[in-house]
Image (cartoon, grey):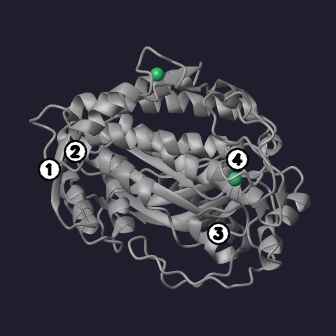
Amino acid sequence: MKLKKYYILLKLFIALALVLLAAGCGGTGGSVGSGNADTGAITAKLNWSGDTSRHILSAPAGVVKVRIIVSGTGMTDIQKDFDAAVGQGTVANIPAGSSRTVTAQGLDASGNVIAKGVISNITIIAGQTTDAGTITIIPVLALADLITNGLDSLGKKDVTGAKAFFKEAVDNYPTVSTNDGDTARFFYAFTRAVGVNLYGTGTTGALGSVGDILDRMGCDSAGRSLTNLAVVCPKTLPSNSPTGSELQSFLYTVIKTELEGALANLNAVSTSFSKSWKEPISGKTYISDFGDVLVLKASIKGALAGILIQYAYNLNANIATEANASHTAQVFLSNNTSFLTRASGYATYLSEAKTYLSQVADDLTAAITKIEPSSRNTAAYLINVNAQAITDAKINLPIWKASLASAQKYDNGKDGISGTADDLIVNLSPFFAGINLRDLMPPITGNNASGYFPDATMGGVIVQGSKMNEDKNGNGIPDILD
Ligand SMILES: [Ca+2]
Ligand SMILES: [Ca+2]
């Protein structure tokens, strides 16, 4: 073969290869233009048959749209939709990096995912186009099957497995408004709220899971079961154990994000939701309904408020150093002079916490209204409440909610509701404006208080009736700390 002829053939081959790359096997692929030096491109072929030995050219009936999602650590998901009939498309600007996952979804006219395929461990190189290979796409399970599988897993105390099924259900059927749709959203929220990941994420940067914390503390990988936790950790903590500040950031980023996601799921559950299921701890079958949704919302918002409040304060300390040396509280505090002082940005975090806590009162009030009727408040339901607790909550919830913003009276019963001399008067608004908690501490000697609180009102929170410095045994130390 002469050189010139060979050159023409080579050019033809390259052109053909480029066309194949762009079009995949006739399926919808992503071919990608790179916008700047930090991003790369990806191309993939889609095989709709579930049989990798042959490529089926077109998407099956019912698939009107193809969604390509590129995800990975340290990047925001990049997703783009293509008309299934078009057969090719471009996804731009994928941040360079390794361990990227490419998900291809076949969407029906309602936006439900009816077929899906994933290819993982793809490396995106800046300025280059990576061939991700062939993504085999197979039909996903029906919503009812995903719910059955999820509840079965839950019944077997496999919270992590259940969570995966419910996530799949919510991800694949985001627009279904039936009771099955509500069931998926409720149980995904429930399992993601309780189903923390006890295994390491395998990343070396910021803490990504509870398992990462256990790993850094040198704890055994055995015994990491959500329903039967029995993890053994070393007596001497490794020097790279998480610091107080790292734990705070973990709560604020990882856990808060997960809880906010759960809240979004619950906000999409309709008031008519009702589902019978086997609660794994007792093994009994209960009904969950919108009353449970409201109680779960209140619990999650309470947890979010807690995360925001802790983040408003400096709680940093080298935990390993302090714990390994068995330092007393006195030494700990002198080593960590900023501990319990306000962190930068505290006003914003405390204000957000206050808003959540106000909503907790609203959600619990709505839950009581839902649960109280005698037809509903029975043992057949997961959450039922005794009559006295309902009466007390109706009195105290409005007072507690109002105390977030202004001084409120809790009657002590001695001089009746109308008399106020005996009342405990609380105003939480100074707390949410931001109090330096370090300044409110009593003197500490060794591990014990050695004097009174400097301010028995705790920064103006306890307006009347404070017993913080009550000292009936006269030993110079508040009785609540004796
Ligand atoms: Ca009174
Ligand atoms: Ca005392």
Residue bearing the label numbered 1: 379
Q: Mark 3: few, some, or many residues within 10 Å (few <14, many ≥20)?
A: many
Q: Nearer the viewer, mark 4 or mark 2?
A: 2
Residue 134, placed above or below residue 474: below
Name the N-terminal-most of marks 4 and 2: 4
Amino acid residing under circle 2: Asn
Element assignment for label 3: helix
Image coordinates for residue 297, horizontal then vertical, percent: 40, 39
- Asked if the beta carbon under badge 4 is closer than 8 A to the nearest atom of ligand 2, the reply is no
Residue bearing the label numbered 3: 213
Residue bearing the label numbered 4: 34
Image coordinates for residue 179, horizontal then vertical, percent: 18, 41
Q: Residue furthest left?
A: 375
Whole-angstrom CA distance, mark 4 to mark 3, is 37 Å
Name the N-terminal-most of marks 4 and 3: 4
The quadrant of the image that shows the N terminus is bottom right
Residue 95 horizontal side relative to residue 269, left or right: right
Q: Nearer the viewer, mark 3 or mark 1?
A: 1
Residue bearing the label numbered 2: 384
Kindly check if marks 4 and 2 are in contact, taking CB atoms under 8 A apart as contact: no
Q: Nearer the viewer, mark 4 or mark 3?
A: 3
